[in-house]
Amino acid sequence: MNRKTLVLPALAGLLAPVLAACGSTDAAGEGGDPIVVGVATEIEATKAAPAPLDPAQAYDVDAWNMLRGTLQTLMRLPRTGTAPVPEAAESCGFRDTQNEQYRCKLRSGLKFSNGHALTAQDVKFSIDRMRTINNTNGPVSLLNDVDKVEAPSDTEVVFHLTKPDATFPQKLATPAAAIVDGAVYPKGRLYSGFDVVGSGPYTLKTERRNNRITKATFTKNPTYKGGVNVKNDKVEMRFFANSQATETALRKGSVDLMYRGLSPDQIKGLENARDKHLILQEMPGQEIRYLAFNTKDPAVSDKAVRKAMAQIVNRSELVRDVYSYTGDPLYSMVPTGLTGHINSFFTKYGNPSVTAARKTLQQANINTPVKFTLTYTTNHYGSSTGKEVRALASQLNSTKLFDIGVKGVDSWQQFRTDALDGKYSVYNMGWFADIPDPDNYIAPFIGKQNFLGSPYRNTKIESQLIPDSRQQSDRNAAAANFKQAQDIIADDVPLLPLWQGKQYVVARDDVTGIEWALNSSSSLQIWELSRGVAD
């Protein structure tokens, strides 16, 4: 097959709803029993990461889902689509042709849950605080292009950017730009623990055991003023050790909805379930899985080693044998369905070839077998992660060119901390986009203060391609920049994309709104859920 003509199934759109709720709902969900969401993950406080719900530290999908319900941002993603709309702001927009000055006017009467007024000074405080703390685990890199923030009045905020950034409105819709109370959150350090003081659709109360959240209760905020239409009075989020335990609770009726982390066997079982009280909904997804390399580690510092791995890894086998086709092979860090996606890794390396990998290593005078440990987190991305990593190691080891061990780390926070400290040669990671834009699948991994703490640098991507792409308000016009960046990553292999996942939500049949449960960034929208019977 001509390498340049491989075609992968494209997504039909970003989380376009498959079914519509055409029925009415009864009073349940508004004053009745809470909607209970089961989550197979953990949110914990550790010595290295003591503030899991402080937006200056929180940078994973589960913590962000909690913050989106409790802290406001100036902008937010709508029910569907990728263009952000005002949230705490009444209006926002660039005020220059270079996309370097962004102004927002706040809604009137905004209040935090403690009764304090929310003003433009709190917005300035929140952004300045994020940048001052500069937490290595946190999302501060999303605000790297901010030069200064001004609050000329109680209702007006002005952002001055160091360079043009057409993606800035989307970044203001993430918890990286969450607005916190300057009278509560310390300016120069993290707000340790599990308390949240915000102005979002809900107030939050948590129950913990051993510094881990076991249950989170979201109660409708009576003073909330924003663009979200809250369709329930209360949502409980219960945390389970794994997706099997979550499914058991769902089938028993103690949980109303679960999503993310379902194993292929669970999805098959739920698709074929004779239990008429459960509904499984599949949605297009932008989640990706990839291998990250510490390019300074002696085992993989030579680009030839990483290229040889790219020539061996069989993505189709992974999708078939591990994930039962609940995902698609991915040949670029930018997933299909987004502007500028190309199959860079297939174009460069083609189908898996041991012969090609052996030649690559021989030409670079690499002694074989190459030895290192492939590390993964056991309980953050779902129960199939271990099987995936062992399958990858088996593919590589069977060639006799590699001798790879596998190690699982139970604590997600410890895994992240050790990875940032450069303790792993190669490790398995997943990515849920901060914003639904190709920029967010390249920029966070490249350059100083990147999400992985990677030592890899590429001047062309950092200094030319990303800055040039951010000058394009029309994101289709930025496609050429992203295509070049994808080709460079395929050539240097600081990252190795593996597969792109679909999204699944399963709920009891008296829960409505599940077609809106996830937005275009795969973020959970708990305010869309209610009880009733759809026609």
Image: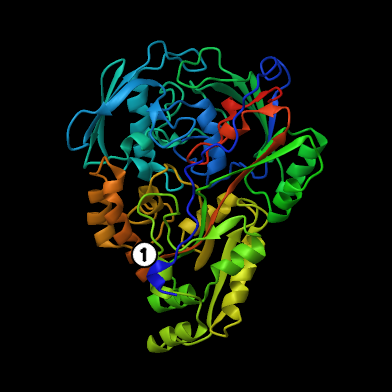
- Using the rendered view, name the quadrant where residue 162 is placed: top left
Task: Find residue 200 and report its horizontal and vertical position in percent.
Answer: 50, 22
Helix or strand or loop: what does disc 1 sit on? Answer: helix
Question: Horizontal and vertical percent for residue 149?
Answer: 27, 29
Task: Kindly identify which residue carries mark 1.
Answer: 489
Q: Is residue 393 in view?
A: yes
484 lies above or below 412: below
Q: Residue at x 40, y 23 (%)?
A: 182
Q: Along the line of sight, which residue is nearer the eye, 21 or 425?
A: 21
Q: Quadrant of the C terminus?
A: top right
Left or right: residue 387 versus residue 476 is right
Question: Where residue 221 appears, x then y in whole percent?
Answer: 56, 17
Which residue sits at x=57%, y=64%?
Answer: 375
Using the rendered view, name the quadrant where residue 43 is placed: top right
Give the crowd class for mark 1: few <14, some 14-19, many >=20 residues within 10 Å: many
In this orientation, which residue lies closer to the viewer: 339 or 322? Answer: 339
Q: Is residue 163 left or right of residue 47?
A: left
Question: Can you give x and y, in whole percent of width and height, for residue 135 in the image?
Answer: 42, 44
Name the one closer to the observer, 199 or 137. 199
Vertical order, 89 against 411 (above or below): above
- What residue occupies the far top of the structure in this picture? 109
Q: Of the residues shown, which amino acid type is indicated by label 1? A: Ile
- Is any atom of residue 51 visible in this view? no
Which color mode does the image show?
rainbow
In which quadrant is the N terminus drawn?
A: bottom left
